Image (tube, grey):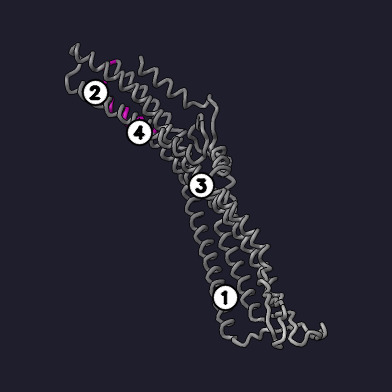
Amino acid sequence: MKMLIKILIFILSTSPMWAQTTSEQAVQSALQNHPLGRAAAFDVQAKKYAEKAAFNLPNPEINAESPTGEFYAVGVLQSFEFPTVYTRQKQVAKAETALAQTGQAVNENELRYTVRTLYLEAQVAEYQARQWAERDSVYIQLAGTAARQFSGGEIDFLQKTLADNQAGIVHQERLAAEQNVYLFRQQLQSLTTIADLSVLSPLEADTVGLFGQTLQGNFTGNPSIAYEQQTARVAEQQIRLAKSRALPNFSLGYLNQGPRNTPLDYRFRASIGIPLWAGQYRAGVKSAEAESQAAIARAEAQSQAIALERERYQREAATKLGLLHYYEREALPRSQVLISTALRLREAGQTDYLTFLRTLDEAYGIKREYATQVQAFETARITLLYLSGR
């Protein structure tokens, strides 16, 4: 009786009648509280501040010297690049800010995928734990019946031992399944920072909602592709910046290099830096161009990889969808018929324990295989969502 009460409590605690923490609620909590999300947000903030530093003039030089040998004159000198350089630096800074924002989207997409996958594993673990709890209750009663029948001389020692052995194995499987539930819940709780996960949604395949949209949708919104494309845009801006560095630079200053009564107009100075060493600037441009070509190639490779993954998981989802329909229409009802029939025949003494246990094992195996197929389908669906950036 105590065992049955424990099983009832376990089943009720994982039943849909209690308040549920859905997969998307877990995802939102992780996005709001995970440290990687905060780190990505700070990266974006840092890049926005870097935009303000794009117009970075060197510090002015203040000097004192005695050009005539009669007195010290105080002067100031300010150097600056050609104005185009500052414009290009600003453009590079903006492109890097956009890259950081795209990187933030990549982080969020990775986190959504991780949480959804872990949530699915927790759902499967709870489904399996409920199945083992149900089976454990049947086998406990079976072992008790076998003991009474052996005492009454209705069955031999071999059948009693077989029933006891199977009951022990099933009980250990149940304990292991409950431990898996605990571990997956702890991991999910750590990842989402939800103090009380309450009850997870029951394991079932989403064959209508997000799956239909994802199967028919396009994958241009994949953030990893967008990240590589933005990296290529940054590289393009770097080429323009490298070219602009070959332009002349300037300096303006003030210094009285004559007598004290030198007119003010003759105290100013100006200079221009002539980019004579064209080789070093040309090398810088070539380096930037090579990096740009590499970034473009990486973006193309990422697009191809995502396309291949999309086709693979679309096929996987379509295949598993057919299997799920078969299990729901035929296999699962058949497993219930096998269990009820086996129990009835055993109670009537019309079957031996070996055949009875084999029948139960096959029937519960169908239920386990159904959970495996649901997990495979949901894994494909979650991956398609990940590939589409949702």
From this view, report whether residue 141 is shown above or below residue 276.
above
Q: Nearer the viewer, mark 2 or mark 1?
A: 1
In the rendered image, residue 142, in percent from the top left (x then y), is placed at 29, 19
The magenta region covers 348-367
The Cα–Cα distance between marks 1 and 4, rounded to whole angstroms, is 60 Å
Kindly identify which residue carries mark 3: 113
* Amino acid found under the numbered disc labelled 4: Gly
* Amino acid found under the numbered disc labelled 3: Tyr
Q: Residue furthest front?
A: 70
From this view, report whether residue 152 is shown above or below residue 64.
above
From this view, report whether residue 237 is shown above or below residue 307.
below
Q: Are marks 2 and 3 in contact (CB under 8 Å)?
A: no
Q: Are marks 1 and 3 in contact (CB under 8 Å)?
A: no
* Amino acid found under the numbered disc labelled 1: Glu
From this view, report whether residue 194 is shown above or below residue 91.
above
Q: Nearer the viewer, mark 1 or mark 4?
A: 1
- Label 3 element class: helix
Q: Is 134 placed left or right of 255 in the picture? A: left
Q: Which is more N-terminal, label 3 or label 2?
A: 3
Q: Are marks 2 and 1 in contact (CB under 8 Å)?
A: no
The residue depicted at 57 percent of the width and 85 percent of the height is: 279
- Label 2 element class: helix
Q: Nearer the viewer, mark 4 or mark 2?
A: 2
Kindly identify which residue carries mark 2: 164
- Would residue 155 be visible to someone looking at this image? yes
Name the chief secondary structure element in magenta.
helix
* Amino acid found under the numbered disc labelled 2: Asp
The Cα–Cα distance between marks 4 and 2, rounded to whole angstroms, is 20 Å
Kindly identify which residue carries mark 1: 289
Q: Which is more N-terminal, label 4 or label 1?
A: 1
